[in-house]
């Protein structure tokens, strides 16, 4: 049986020291997650997304100018957003 995204995200955050907000546990998790790197320690954004377009909208409208890391928990890779589209980054 496949590991749920919520379990994958929590395990990743615990391994690398990313803070998980309490709001993260209120909803089911989806494939794409965002980590706010401006926070000390880095903090997971409580919302996760099913498609890249919604992540791009969030980054363009709510996270402009903030250093963010976008993670794809299906393909286990970081995504790099250039303001228009995503490209696959390093695996995790």
Image (cartoon, rainbow, N blue to C red):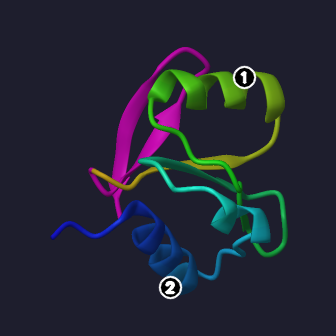
How many other residues sit within 10 Å of disc 1, few (<14), some (14-19) or many (≥20)? some
| Residue 5 locus on image (x, y percent) | 40, 61
Q: Nearer the viewer, residue 50 or 68?
A: 50
**Which residue corresponds to the image point at 30% horizontal and 52% vertical from the top-left?**
74
Give the extent of the magenta segment: 75-92
Residue at the spot 38% in from the left edge and 31% down from the top edge: 87
Residue under pointer 1: 60
Neighbor class of circle 2 (other Cα within 10 Å; few <14, some 14-19, many 20+) is few
Residue 77 versus residue 15 in the image, above or below: above
Q: Residue at x 79, y 35 (%)?
A: 63
- Identify the main secondary structure in magenta: strand
Q: Where does the image place residue 3, in percent across and percent down from the top left?
A: 28, 70
Residue nearest the viewer, comparing 23 with 66 = 23
Residue identified by numbered label 2: 15
Task: Tell me which numbered mark, 1 or 2, is placed earlier along the sequence.
Answer: 2
Which residue, as the protein is rendered here, is positioned at the far top?
Answer: 84
Q: Is residue 32 above or below residue 11?
A: above
């Amino acid at each position: 049986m496949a590991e749920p995204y919520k379990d994958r995200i929590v395990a990743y955050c615990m391994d690398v020291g990313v803070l998980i907000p309490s709001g993260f546990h209120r909803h089911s998790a989806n494939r794409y997650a965002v980590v706010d790197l401006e926070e000390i320690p880095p903090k997971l954004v409580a919302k996760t997304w099913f498609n890249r377009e919604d992540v791009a909208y969030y980054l363009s409208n709510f996270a402009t100018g903030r250093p963010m890391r976008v993670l794809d928990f299906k393909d286990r890779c970081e995504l790099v957003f250039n303001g228009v589209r995503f490209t696959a980054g390093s695996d995790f």
